[in-house]
Image: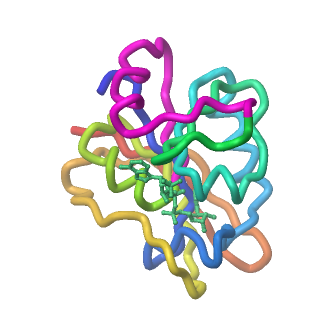
Amino acid sequence: MKDLYMIACVSKDGGLGKDGGLLWHIPEDMKFFRETTKGSTVIMGRKTFESIGRALPGRRNIVLSSRKGESADVEWCTREELEDTLKTVSGKKFVIGGASLYEMFLPAAEKIYLTEVDGVKPADTLFPEFDKSKWHREIIQDSEYDGAKYEIVEYTRR
Ligand SMILES: NC(=O)c1ccc[n+]([C@@H]2O[C@H](COP(=O)([O-])OP(=O)(O)OC[C@H]3O[C@@H](n4cnc5c(N)ncnc54)[C@H](OP(=O)(O)O)[C@@H]3O)[C@@H](O)[C@H]2O)c1
């Protein structure tokens, strides 16, 4: 889908989160996320929205759920409504998690921004496996935080 991107931070084994929270809290990764998604539409699952706890400012927030949630500062969509809503969104759309949304949108994504941390932590949600030979890999940033090396990578579908 045009202008549909995914953005995530993963451990070496694809770990995304545990007990509803993130595994890594890397300030430069958070900054990259903020700057990359600023002014765009973000799409997330209900559990990810609950883990963030509020709408992300300066972005159109769409939350996928089987029912309407109580927060009025985001747009609640069922799977069917999301299909229709996405057709009306102009500009960049970022899938920001969690695992079920990454899985769902992997076939449609044009780009994936992955912060790949060279470390492993116990996780209960994983980023889906994908065939990296089908994507062009470009390192945007590489650094280290709190003893963990990481690369911020842009994958573009070949
Ligand atoms: N490392 C990262 O970059 C990153 C990014 C985001 C999230 N995370 C982590 O990932 C974890 C959450 O991910 P998750 O996979 O467990 O949950 P999630 O994808 O955020 O949310 C799952 C929920 O989305 C809704 N949903 C999914 N598919 C649907 C469908 N076809 N139709 C209607 N609703 C649908 C359902 O909500 P209802 O139950 O309300 O119907 C479902 O329970 C947390 O630990 C979070 O911290 C990590």
Side (left or right) of 79 relative to 67: left
Side (left or right) of 58 relative to 46: right
Extreme residue in the bottom direction:
122
Q: Which residue shows up at 64% across the image and 77% down it?
A: 19
Most foreground residue, 136 or 11? 11
Q: Which residue shows up at 73% across the image and 50% down it?
A: 30
- On screen, residue 121 above or below 67: below
Location of residue 36 (image quadrant): top right
Quarter of the image for the C terminus: give it.
top left
- Residue 14 covered by magenta stretch: no
Residue 107: x, y in percent? 24, 44
Q: Which residue shows up at 64% across the image and 25% down it?
A: 60
Most foreground residue, 88 or 149? 88
Span shown in magenta: 72-97
- On screen, residue 23 above or below 44: below
- Residue 84 covered by magenta stretch: yes
Residue 64: x, y in percent? 49, 43
Residue 3: x, y in percent? 40, 24
Quarter of the image for the N terminus: give it.
top left
- On screen, residue 144 above or below 95: below
Residue 94: x, y in percent? 51, 35
